Image (cartoon, rainbow, N blue to C red):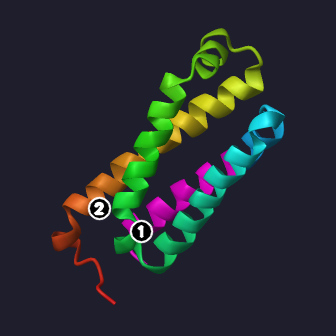
């Protein structure tokens, strides 16, 4: 496994862990949506571990959707601006922006350099 692949898998695992924490402290009426989103990240993690070339574009699309969703949600913006409750703000900022930005950047870097990195075609 290449270093870039390990990096993307590690970012996805970090997102999944942050999401599990977020599900527990988030609004219970959105638990079904949160579980579906977290399941998506678990599947992307497994696929990225197995065949990274199949997940580069989905990784970027899901990261963009999560970033836009966090930015478009007035409730999320209120929590992040007021830091009330602090745990939710931390999960939203780290999981919704920092880790998603890292996933987007790492996937984009791997996608643009896939010919030079000789991404395995199995």
Q: Is residue 73 above or below residue 4?
A: above
Q: Is residue 50 above or below residue 43?
A: below
Q: Residues within 10 Å of mark 2 (few under 14, many from 20)?
A: many
The answer to whether residue 2 is magenta is yes
Residue under the image location 58 percent in, 67 percent down = 43
- Label 1 or label 2, whichever comes before in sequence order: 1
Q: Main secondary structure of the magenta part?
A: helix
Element under label 1? helix
In the rendering, at what x and y percent does residue 60 appear?
A: 37, 51
User: Which residue is farthest bottom?
Assistant: 122
| Residue 111: quadrant of the picture | bottom left
- What x and y, as percent, mark residue 118? 22, 78
Spatial distance from mark 1 to mark 2, Cα to Cα? 8 Å
Q: Position of residue 33 (x, y in %)?
A: 68, 45
Q: Residues within 10 Å of mark 1 (few under 14, many from 20)?
A: many
Residues marked 1 and 2 touching at CB (< 8 Å): yes
Q: Which residue is mark 1?
A: 5
Q: Is residue 1 left or right of residue 94?
A: left
Residue 57 location, x and y as percent?
34, 59
Q: Is residue 58 magenta?
A: no
Q: Which residue is mark 2?
A: 110
Q: Which mark is residue 96?
A: none
For the magenta stretch, what is the residue range? Answer: 1-19
């Amino acid at each position: 496994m290449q270093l870039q692949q390990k990096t993307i898998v590690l970012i996805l695992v970090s997102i999944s862990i942050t999401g599990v924490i977020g599900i527990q402290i988030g609004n219970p009426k959105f638990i079904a949506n949160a579980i579906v989103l977290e399941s998506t990240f678990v599947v992307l993690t497994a696929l990225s571990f197995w065949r990274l070339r199949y997940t580069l574009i989905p990784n970027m699309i899901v990261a963009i959707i999560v970033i836009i969703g966090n930015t478009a949600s007035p409730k999320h913006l209120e929590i992040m601006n007021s830091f009330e409750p602090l745990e939710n703000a931390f999960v939203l900022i780290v999981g919704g922006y920092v880790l998603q930005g890292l996933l987007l950047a790492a996937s984009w870097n791997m996608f643009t350099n896939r010919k030079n990195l000789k991404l395995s075609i199995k």
